[in-house]
Every structure is written in structure tokens, then in C-alpha cells.
Image: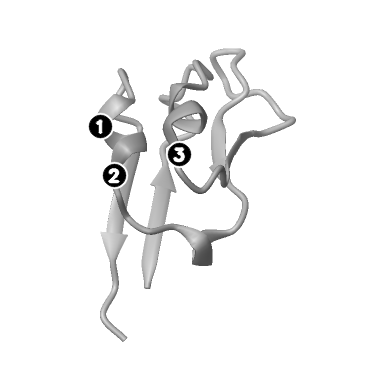
Amino acid sequence: MVKLVFDQARCKGCELCSAVCPKKIIYMEKHFNAKGFRPAAVAEMEKCVACAACAKICPDAAIEIYREEE
């Protein structure tokens, strides 16, 4: 199982992660963080293939990917 963790306080809402996601499961929240940006989140965690494209492109290193053994 894969777990994506977004540091919503660090995210500046640039949407680069959602643009590169091959499964198109990353979206921008409706609420704003303390910096005034709409942070990224994942819609369907079970569809994530842990390609790490989102984490690699994030300029703020606000995304971490964990692979949990079943």
C-alpha cells in the first residue's frame, strides 16, 4: 500500500504535482493554508502507483511517499 503525505503548510499551490501525476489523483483543496494558498491533496490513494513524479517536481519538498508492506 502506498501513502502520499502532503505538508499542507509548506505547499504553495503551484499545481505542478497534479500536472505530472499519471493517474490524475492529485487536486487542490478548497480551503487555504496559513500562507494563503490552496494546498494539494490526493483523491484516491489506492490508485497511486508510487512513481514519485509529484515529489520530484515539488519545488517546496512538500510531498512524501511511503510504501507500506501488507
How far apart marks 3 and 1 lie (CA) works out to: 11 Å
Q: Which mark is residue 56?
A: 1
Q: Is residue 62 above or below residue 13?
A: below
Q: Are marks 2 and 1 in contact (CB under 8 Å)?
A: yes
Circle 3 packing at 10 Å, graded few (<14), some (14-19), many (20+), is some
Identify residue type, mark 3.
Answer: Cys
Mark 3, mark 1: which one is toward the viewer?
Answer: 3
The residue pinned by badge 2 equals 52
Q: Are marks 3 and 2 in contact (CB under 8 Å)?
A: no
Identify residue type, mark 1.
Answer: Lys
* Along the line of sight, the residue nearer the viewer: 33 or 54: 54
* Colour mapping used in the image: one colour
Is 64 positioned to the left or the right of 47 in the image? left
* Residue 9 percent coordinates (x, y): 47, 28
What residue is drawn where x is 45% and y is 39%?
A: 21
What residue is drawn where x is 56% and y is 28%?
A: 39
Q: Which mark is residue 18?
A: none
- What secondary structure is marked by label 1? helix
Circle 1 packing at 10 Å, graded few (<14), some (14-19), many (20+), is some
| Quadrant of the rendered image containing residue 61 | top left
Q: Which mark is residue 21?
A: 3
Q: Is residue 62 above or below residue 14?
A: below
Identify residue type, mark 2.
Answer: Ala
